[in-house]
């Protein structure tokens, strides 16, 4: 039977939260085979709020409000706004692809058949950064536009001077769109746009994040993980604590992902692949062995405290799984993959999460396994944050 996710009421905040969860299933890094996603995403939201792994370039945070402001000025009604906004978003694709700097273009392959529009991907970030002032989901904004126009008309009439009414959908200091937008878009930010975005990061939702610190105080760094940043020593104690806990979590739990794939290879009688994963497990364990004392002293209670985030719920079962896995590795090291208690821990965790869709009990689900699942090392959206920071730095130099 096909699984579905639905809500019973039409509370805007709950609907937006549900849409955010659904969007996560499309993100490559969010493939969550062992139920660790809430912990990973809690760290990600603390470090790099407003980002997601399917965001690409910073200037989409300007393209989207420029499109909607254009349509608002034309008083496009609610019944037409979704289609007209989609058309304008899709028309960005070809001219952006024609640019020299065209990495991260939405619709590179799908073109006009694009299903996830940039506006749906960036909407939560636009609201978090204070660029979008409308207090609800994109679909609610579409439905509300007619009422917004009426409220503006009343405000203009009551102002009795023809003054522009209060702008309550988009930030009033948003830099204006270039005269040739949307016909000739580019990912290059102007200096004014870069300064505006950096100022937005000083809002209450982001000012204490690592993203804000890096945007204001550091040059871009081309490193694979945020804890490898060359200016790490200058970060606040809070940021260093976050990164150290995130680093240990990512490194230790990667072994669980390897063993999960090893067990699937064995279940599918793919002996050569199983041997490959056994070697990978050995290499992972040997690499981690130098930190055994640090991991033994790791305060796991402190991990849950520092990772706690209002947008994510870390279940007791997830905590027990992490604790049990770390204890087993500390006790048995590289030979852990052969032990039945470790194998049982992995199998039981996946069964609890997937029920009858578990690859360990559902033959069809096992056959659909592509040979690897959940093996991308966790970087907590660093790649996407790094891209934003690079775009920002180029804009500030403009």
Image (tube, helix red, strand yellow):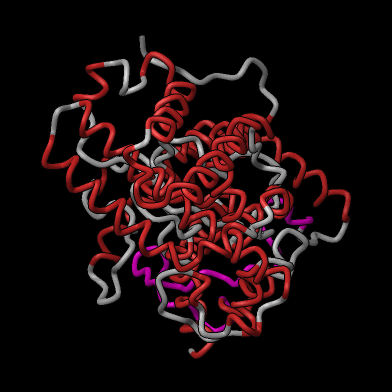
Q: Which residues are magenta?
A: 165-193
Query: If the image is split into quadrants, where does the N terminus sit?
Result: top left
Q: Position of residue 299 (x, y in %)?
A: 69, 55
Q: Is residue 377 above or below residue 28?
A: below
Viewer-proximal residue, 339 or 24?
Answer: 339
277 is within the stretch colored magenta: no
205 displayed left or right of 180: right
Query: Residue 92's spot in the image, x, y percent?
Result: 34, 58
Q: Main secondary structure of the magenta part?
A: loop
Residue 395 appears at what percent x and percent y? 49, 82
Residue 88, how many percent across, how many down? 39, 51
Left or right, 52 with respect to 16, comes to: left
Which residue is depicted at the point 49% across and 47% down? 331
Q: Quadrant of residue 9?
A: top right
* Residue 137 visible at all: yes
Residue at point 38%, 30% (across, down): 340
């Amino acid at each position: 039977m096909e699984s579905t996710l639905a809500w019973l009421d039409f509370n805007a905040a709950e609907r937006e939260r549900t849409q955010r969860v659904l969007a996560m299933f499309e993100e490559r890094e969010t493939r969550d085979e062992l139920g660790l996603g809430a912990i990973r995403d809690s760290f990600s939201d603390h470090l790099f709020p407003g980002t997601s792994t399917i965001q690409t370039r910073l200037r989409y945070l300007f393209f989207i409000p420029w499109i909607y402001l254009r349509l608002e000025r034309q008083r496009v009604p609610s019944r037409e706004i979704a289609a007209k906004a989609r058309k304008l978003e899709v028309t960005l694709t070809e001219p952006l692809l024609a640019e020299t700097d065209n990495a991260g273009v939405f619709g590179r392959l799908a073109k006009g058949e694009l299903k996830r529009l940039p506006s749906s991907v960036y909407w939560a970030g636009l609201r978090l950064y204070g660029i979008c002032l409308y207090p609800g989901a994109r679909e609610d904004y579409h439905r509300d536009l007619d009422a917004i126009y009426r409220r503006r008309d009343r405000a203009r009439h009551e102002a009795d001077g023809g003054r522009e009414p209060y702008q309550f959908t988009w930030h009033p200091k948003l830099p204006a769109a270039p005269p040739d937008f949307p016909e000739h878009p580019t990912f290059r930010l102007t200096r004014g746009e870069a300064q505006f975005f950096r100022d937005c990061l000083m809002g209450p939702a982001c000012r204490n994040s690592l993203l804000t610190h890096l945007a204001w105080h550091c040059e871009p760094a081309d490193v694979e993980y945020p804890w490898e940043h060359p200016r790490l020593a200058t970060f606040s104690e809070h940021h260093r604590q976050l990164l150290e806990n995130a680093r240990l979590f990512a490194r230790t739990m990667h072994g669980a992902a390897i063993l999960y794939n090893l067990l699937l290879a064995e279940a599918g009688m793919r002996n050569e692949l199983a041997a490959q994963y056994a070697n990978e497990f050995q290499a992972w364990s040997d690499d981690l062995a130098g930190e055994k004392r640090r991991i033994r002293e790791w305060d796991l209670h402190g991990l849950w405290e520092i990772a706690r985030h209002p947008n994510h719920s870390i279940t007791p079962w997830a905590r027990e799984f992490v604790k049990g896995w770390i204890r087993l590795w500390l006790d048995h090291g590289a030979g852990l993959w052969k032990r039945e208690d470790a194998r049982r821990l992995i199998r039981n965790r996946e069964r609890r999460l997937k029920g009858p869709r578990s690859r360990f009990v559902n033959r069809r689900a096992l056959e659909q396994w592509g040979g690897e699942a959940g093996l991308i090392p966790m970087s907590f959206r660093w790649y996407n944050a790094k891209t934003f920071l690079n775009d920002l730095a180029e804009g500030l130099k403009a």
